[in-house]
Image: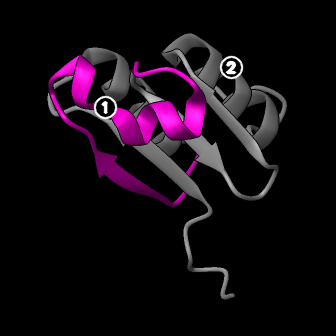
């Protein structure tokens, strides 16, 4: 496995403000990630339910740490505490 393979996968919706918040933090931290766009219909988001136990987005899978989570505020906090340099501004 090379360093260029993204170890983070973000499950998101097009034009979702919560998803965009996570994208902004990923970009600010310079993290490479893979975007997976999910079904707009909440009831059709089975792939997200399989990985996170919920159908809500955003959801993130971090292969580096084995962490899977949803809720944008939790994801942002996790990314900053895991990959930020002491809360990089």
Tally of numbered tags: 2
Identify the residue at image location x=57%, y=25%.
53
Note whether 26 is above or below 86 in the view shown: below
Question: Which residue carries the number 1 mark?
Answer: 45
> On the rendered image, what quadrant is the N terminus found in?
bottom right
For numbered disc 2, what is the local secondary structure? Answer: helix
Part of the protein shown in magenta: 29-56
User: What number is the disc on residue 63?
Assistant: none
The residue lying toward the viewer, choosing from 60 and 55, is 55
User: What number is the disc on residue 77?
Assistant: 2
**Seen in the image, is 68 located left or right of residue 65?**
left
Residue at the extreme bottom of the image, as rendered: 2
Identify the residue at image location x=32%, y=27%.
20
Res 19 quadrant in image:
top left
Query: Does the segment drawn in magenta span residue 18?
Result: no
- Residue 39 at x, y percent in the picture: 19, 35
Gap in angstroms between the C-alphas marked 1 and 2: 24 Å
The residue lying toward the viewer, choosing from 45 and 7, is 45
Identify the residue at image location x=32%, y=35%.
12
**Seen in the image, is 64 located left or right of residue 35?**
right
- Residue 83 at x, y percent in the picture: 74, 43
Query: Does the segment drawn in magenta span residue 43?
Result: yes
Whichever of callouts 1 and 2 sits on the residue coming sooner in the sequence is 1
The residue lying toward the viewer, choosing from 79 and 68, is 68
- Residue 50 at x, y percent in the picture: 52, 38
Badge nearest the viewer, 1 or 2: 1
């Amino acid at each position: 496995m090379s360093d260029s393979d993204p170890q983070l996968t973000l499950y998101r919706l097009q034009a979702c403000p919560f998803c965009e918040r996570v994208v902004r933090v990923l970009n600010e931290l310079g993290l490479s990630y893979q975007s997976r766009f999910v079904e707009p219909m909440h009831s059709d988001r089975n792939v997200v339910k399989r990985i996170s136990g919920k159908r809500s987005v955003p959801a993130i899978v971090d292969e580096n740490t084995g962490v899977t989570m949803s809720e944008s505020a939790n994801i942002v906090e996790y990314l900053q505490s895991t990959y930020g340099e002491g809360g990089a501004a």
